[in-house]
Amino acid sequence: MPTHDVLVIGAGLAGQRAALAAAEQGVSVGILSKVHPVRSHSNAAQGGINAALNPGDSWESHAFDTVKGSDYLGDQDAIAVMCEEAPEEILHLEHLGVTFHRNEEGKLGTRAFGGASAARTYYVADITGQAIMHVLYEQLMKHSDSVARYEEWFCTALAMDEQGECCGVVTRNIADGSMQLFSAKAVILACGGNGQAWKPTTNALICTGDGISMAYRVGAKLMDMEMIQYHPTTLAGKGFLITEGARGEGAHLLNAKGERFMERYAPNKMELASRDVVSRAEQTEINEGRGFPDGTVALDITVVPKKRIHEALREIVLVGRDFAGVDITKEPIHIKPGNHYTMGGIKTDIDGRTNIPGLYAAGETACVSVHGGNRLGANSLLDTLIFGRRSGADAAGRAKRIEGSRPSRGALEAEQASIDEIAAREKGSGRRVSEIKQELGTTMDAKVAVFRDEAGIQEALEIVRRLKEEAKSAYIDDKGNIFNQDILGAIELGYMLDNAECTCVAALERKESRGAQYRTDFPERNDEEWLKHIDLQQGDDGPEISYSEVTITQWQPEARTY
Amino acid sequence: MADYTIKVRRFQPESGEGPYWEKFNVDLEPSLSVLDALLQAKDRDDGSLSVRCSCRAAICGSCGMKINGQSGLGCKTQIGEAQELAEKKASVGSGDGTIVIEPMGNMPVIKDLITDMESTHWTKIRRVTPWLLPHGEPPEREYVVEPESMIDITQSMACIQCGACVSSCLSMEADPDFIGPAALAKAYRFVGDPRDAETKERLHDLAHDPHGIYDCTHCFSCIDACPKGVAPMDQIMRLRRKAGEEGIEDPNSGHHHELAFVKIIEKKGTLDEVALPRESFTFGIKGKLKPSKRAIKEVIGALPTIFRTIRRGKVRSKWIAPHHKLPGGAQDEVKAIYEHAEEHREEFNLYIKGEEGDEEAAIAEGLEPPPHAPASEEAAQ
């Protein structure tokens, strides 16, 4: 049985950072991912990473922007930790070799980003996530004697001991289909978000909420699951992302009449208001008939100097050219709000600990909560790194402290039986997995999106529950062992359905409008009743609801204008 | 919507059968991708059709494959364009007009379009010590470096490790031990990084490896294949130039061979194949410097080849028929190109200059002279 002190599931930025931090403490570390680490979705974070590193800036200012951006649902102690530790983390990355943009003096240079009161976003052209992740992978290769990599291994369940502590995971080696039980004194889930439960989405095909679902199934608490970010600038149809960096560099949003409509919604910050604000503004323009016939508005990047576009927005030039047939240096590109980010997730403290001993979570899988109702652009990379590092360090500390128990073979056998059952389903016995996934995605995008109401969410919840039933008999074609992606797709469908159910239940419960949750039937923020987190735990009939306090330290809630 | 037929080279390792071709009919918008077509076939017809994929947006590097014989990303190749190319090929007698999809080359195939990148691509990446090796403790704040140096290596950082360049590499086909375009582009990311303290050691290592930087044959395949504009061959050429600047003597005389090549063209306009080995091995200063023992050995070893090529009329001895000169003032034009290149030593870098053919940006950057008169309506605006 492969045994590690600390086992990290997922190898995006949070996972890799956690593994490196744990290894620094001298414990044995394994990192396991269903794709090769550099394929992870942290790649897609284009714009940059926030830190108050400039002499004129302060972590308090960064923290306040984050609190305000979160619509006061973010926990202020966690936000303080993130913003205070940000500068050191940026310098650490720079020392490891990240090719951050420099100013004329050769020092780190910044760009402006949405919802921020200062230009504090550090970046590598518009491939910031990719650049950081490849540099961390360089470090994993460098430290291969202390961090074992399990590349293309799929995690199907967490293993629990008799005391209710997490002591390992059940996995499938994708290369040969063998099932393997891993033993670990601490397991860190860093599996990313659940965007694939929506269609379209900016998220990669791998973002199926695996970690959130696996944790939920063993009794971990989830939090803020109703908070799903719609990014203001995605391509219609395919859902590809156009970085907020484009607006950071000065691009305008225009409706079909050519009006810079943000004047009416956020006269001060204009295009650089918080994402929820900009997405709602766009959707309002579209709904009220001032959009283009294809249900979009326009992003005009031509106002940015050409030299600057090539230097700082090259990826967007390629996306425009290859996926929309538009030369963004010459004409506006049509965009709309699209599913982008999971603010909620597994409830953790500031060291990544969940309510289950031995189980940690970090990055988009987790909800610390630093993003609350709405995440600021360029805070997600920061979240992954700060809380990835803290989780790794704390998990290593636990591993040094405890004896640890071996997971029972029963967990492995149960998972094997469940996979055999999926493979044994007769063709035509039910629906195809892909059909159910398609219906799930379009349902969520229609009913649980920028604007929501009780009837719509209720309808979505009923559909999700029907799909859960249908998934039990959904059949697959591939019966083999080697690289059986069909089996993995069926398991991922189950993960996505758990995520979607939780989001619907929480969205139905929160009877107010805050951050990404805008209820047309409750259009106002209601601090008196709803300045609290919605926590969910698995019960007999789906998610059971409880509440927890929002930690407020120095910033009292006030009206949110940009 | 339009109907397309894709022909996929399949291999099911557990079937006991060899590879085979299978056609799938799909219907989708021409602007959608070859990957979208594969996923549609997988979703509707056969879930066992296997292809690595994730982001669908040319960022994650999972879906490297060959489409109509060309290496690239499935998600970045539009199905309509792939169809046009397939028809074009059919019109000149190659193929039947259906889009042909195969796994990447230069790598073992595991299943359908899934290849074993670990034993090839990643092993080669690890060969170049792919992490920063700075000297001593890091500074308290950031390393202060030239802004341009970061932009310069960002072109290599844009690599997504998809393997398309490796798949297309002709040198690797001939020499599977060649370190290859992706790993050498990665190496440049450190060699070009002012924070790295082992530049000379890295260059020495890559120049002395018989499968290193001088194993590249300038075929441009990797530049064509790369979906991210990394231009691996350009990075290899930079490594060579830096190795030369460092005065590194490589066992292939690769650096001197390049200098000889450049010098001969400057002088004669076309390649004088008789002069090339001589200039390469005697450092271009005939009679002043004695060739090294190894160079003499190389020349003697090459004698059978030389005689064979003379016999077949591929090269002419200078005593029998001297190398021809360029007609008219053409040699002056060659000289002018050399002078221009000498004055404009900037590297071609997409982060500075923009996409190929973007003249406006090049002019703005002073990389190209401005046009004398607006030639078209567009330029007049």
Image: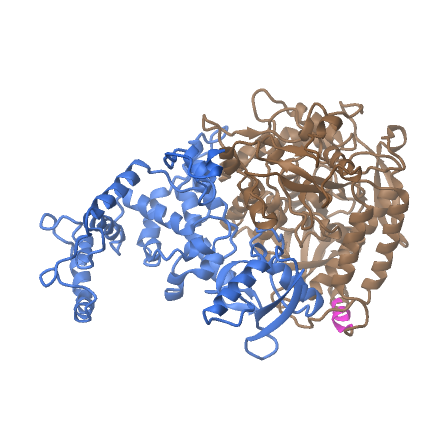
Chain colours: A brown, B blue
Observer-nearest of B64 and A15: B64
Observer-nearest of B12 and A554: B12
The residue drawn where x is 49% and y is 58% is B164
Quarter holding the N terminus of chain A is bottom right
Side of B350 relative to A335 (left or right): left
How far from the left and from the top, in percent, is residue A56?
A: 58, 20
Do we see residue A343 in this rendering? Answer: no
Side of B65 relative to A41 (left or right): left
Image quadrant where residue B245 sits: top left
The residue drawn where x is 43% and y is 33% is B364
What main secondary structure does the magenta stretch of the protein show? helix
Observer-nearest of B197 and A560: A560
Image quadrant where residue A283 sits: top right
How far from the left and from the top, in percent, is residue A87?
A: 58, 30
How far from the left and from the top, in percent, is residue A236?
A: 69, 47
Observer-nearest of B55 and A100: B55
